Amino acid sequence: MASSDDIDGWFGSDDATPSVPMARPASGSADAQPSQPPQPTTTRSRTLSLTSALGSIAGTLSSYVRHAAASLPSSATPYASGSMPSVFRDSIPEVTGDLGADGPPLSRNMPLETDPPSAVDAGSVLTDRSLTMDADLVDDFEHIDEEDHAATARQAAIQESLAAMANVLELNGRLPMTKPVLTLDLALQLRGHLPILPRIADRWQLVYSMDQHGISLATLYDKFRTAVSNKTVQQRGFVLVILDSTGRKFGAFLSDPLHNSQSFFGTGETFVFSCDKESDKATVYPWTGENEYFLFGDLKYFAVGAGDGHFALWLDHDLEQGKSDPVPTFGNPVLASASTFVCYELEVWGVAP
């Protein structure tokens, strides 16, 4: 190995001025020239000397490392901390990246004393994690099942309540001498198509009757307003029933009270219906979603459903002349006995609070 004196010779002494020895001619020669003063070493020559010195050190260390590696027993592993002197082990990453064919590259970031987990250990870890995940999933599913059972129980209770009330409904406010349009049987049929809150009510209140309150669209609007303001009925949800001159019953469920609006209003809860003349069985036509022309009212007429210049139900300000045509709002056929009809009786019912 190179001694410290040799290394000092490679780099030069700090106390001496670097110089290049000059050749001296033989004494007495005719070509003898006066001796030249020493010239300073250039930066290039100093760099070359430093590069040569580093190369010599790297070559020496590399030889020692390879010699040490060759002397290891065959069962030794480069990962064991006692397999080689620490001075060589710490120097390996700076000098060389491998030990030849006998082992993988060494790095100071690699664990020297910890073996990688075996396949059995890794399998155990995965199994433990799988069991934990399975237990969590089971808990989640049990929680979901409990919620589903609770929801099912609530739905069953609601259905039982509705079934118990199916045949319990009072029609209040109609005078004994008033000609009835809405029968209890028809009311029970329509009840099953109403939104949930009006459906569970057990009392309906008469809001307007042509026979009982007079024939006028203005009176009809006023009866809606009075019933709502006096809270004799709920603010939303009304059943309108018409009897035409041929004895056909038809009408609509109004999501909102009729009034002078100058524009369409209402919601998709609105629907229209028509009854068979013989059996009085009702056929309901709910909102199709095609448009939102649910309800309209002004001082000349009111209408339910519209599209393509037609109305599902239209009645003039005298509540006498009416029209009914198919419209996309409900996808309904003609509800009355004919497209043009004469209104014979009309009733409006609200849900009592």
Image (cartoon, helix red, strand yellow):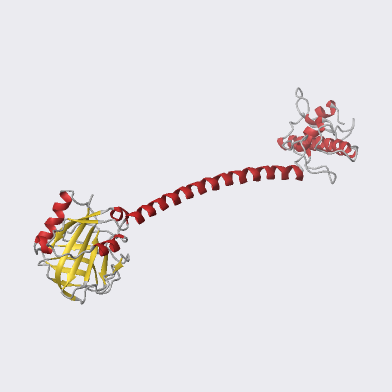
Q: Is residue 285 left or right of residue 49?
A: left
Question: As drawn, which residue projects farthest toward the top?
Answer: 15
Tell me residue 105's x, y (percent).
78, 42
Q: Residue at x 16, y 52 (%)?
A: 227
Vertical comparison of 223 with 86: above or below: below
Who is closer to the viewer here, 81 or 222? 222
Vertical comparison of 103 with 36: above or below: below
Tell me residue 26's x, y (percent).
90, 32
Q: Is residue 2 left or right of residue 221?
A: right
Tell me residue 160's x, y (percent).
38, 53
Who is closer to the viewer here, 287 or 350? 350
Tell me residue 7's x, y (percent).
82, 29
Q: Residue at x 13, y 62 (%)?
A: 178
Classify residue 24 by image quadrant.
top right
Residue 238: tell me if it is visible. yes
Q: Is residue 72 left or right of residue 153?
A: right
Q: Quadrant of the N terminus?
A: top right
